[in-house]
Image (spheres, rainbow, N blue to C red):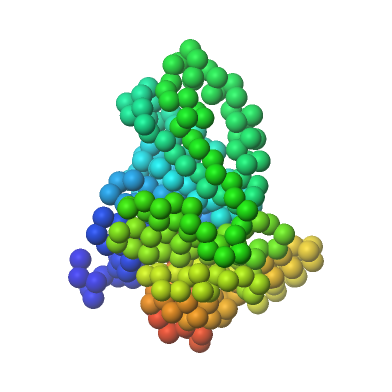
Amino acid sequence: MDSSTATPEERTTVSRGDTKVVVLGSHGGQQITQLTGSHLRCGTSMLIDVGGEVTVVDCGCGSVHRLAEAGYDAHQVRTVLVTHCHADHVAELGSLVSFAWSSGRNGADPDRRLDVYGPTGTGDYEAGLKRSLARSIADQEGPLAQTPPFDAFATWHEFTPPPTTRTLVERPDLVVQAIRVRHGSMPSVGYRVRTPDVDVAISGDRGVGGDSFDAFAAGADVLVHEVIDRPLVTGVLEAEGAAPSFVRHLVDDHTDAPDVGRTATAAGVDTLVLYHLIPGNPAITDDRWVDLVRPTYDGAIVVARDLMVI
Ligand SMILES: [Zn+2]
Ligand SMILES: [Zn+2]
């Protein structure tokens, strides 16, 4: 499609060649939302498809269904990148990994495997998942003779959030780097994912200051960054009598819209995608988000919606 005639939702700004970048979930925070209709938002998740081999970044609530709605099968997922272990980012991690294992069952491809990378806390998740699925895994590996065994299929790589750039994956089709971002007391990272076609920086959840993410993201084709409408959220929560510690977490550990613009400007990226929207209420218009960021950033701004190909 000629991008000059495409609507904003149809226009792709980043995907090219064999690489497709898809928003699976654009909502920030821990709530269950409706999944019907592409204009509604489920929990945080991004997908990067390189020639049919899929990398998923975070697995928020609803993201497994969004994966299917985007036209993918779980068995295509080869790499999962976890930014941190807040529930809105790992709610469906176990479902994704276990169904990815099951959906390519019985050795059709004995070398098939999935790698999960995540910061401190990911190992606890792995151990808890295996405990909770112990009977299912034992039954599938035993009487049902499913191969490869779960542990041979899913390899978990927990790492300490690195203060400087650390390379986790280095293959011709995929390079993944991570860096620590500041997100309160939660060990957290941002990622840089390079394919032969596209170079994507993803913030995960972060507050401003105290990390080197701006430099880490420099030169990427696109910056996918979380955002909060701080004055709106603070006002609503205080009016509702929310616990001060919770309000502080939202305000201090997420990035207000003008600061997202400053990060995008500092990184020198041409395109900024706003995701992990707080609030994620679709009644808040794209124009409002763009107006909040525009004073500090003059590049292209895309407000993520579920199933959008960017
Ligand atoms: Zn979050
Ligand atoms: Zn978080």
Which quarter of the picture shows residue 186?
bottom right
* Residue 88 image point, x, y percent: 59, 52
Res. 119 in view: yes
* Residue 283 image point, x, y percent: 51, 67
Image side of residue 26 versus residue 103, left or right: right
Q: Nearer the viewer, residue 207 or 210?
A: 210
Q: Nearer the viewer, residue 15 or 191?
A: 191
Residue found at x 70% / y 74%: 235
Res. 38 in view: no
Q: Quadrant of the C terminus?
A: bottom left
* Residue 251 image point, x, y percent: 68, 70
From this viewpoint, which residue is outermost toward the top? 143
Which quarter of the picture shows residue 180?
bottom right
Q: Nearer the viewer, residue 285 or 140?
A: 140
Depicted 29 relative to depicted 144: above or below: below
Depicted 51 relative to depicted 140: above or below: below
Residue found at x 70% / y 63%: 184
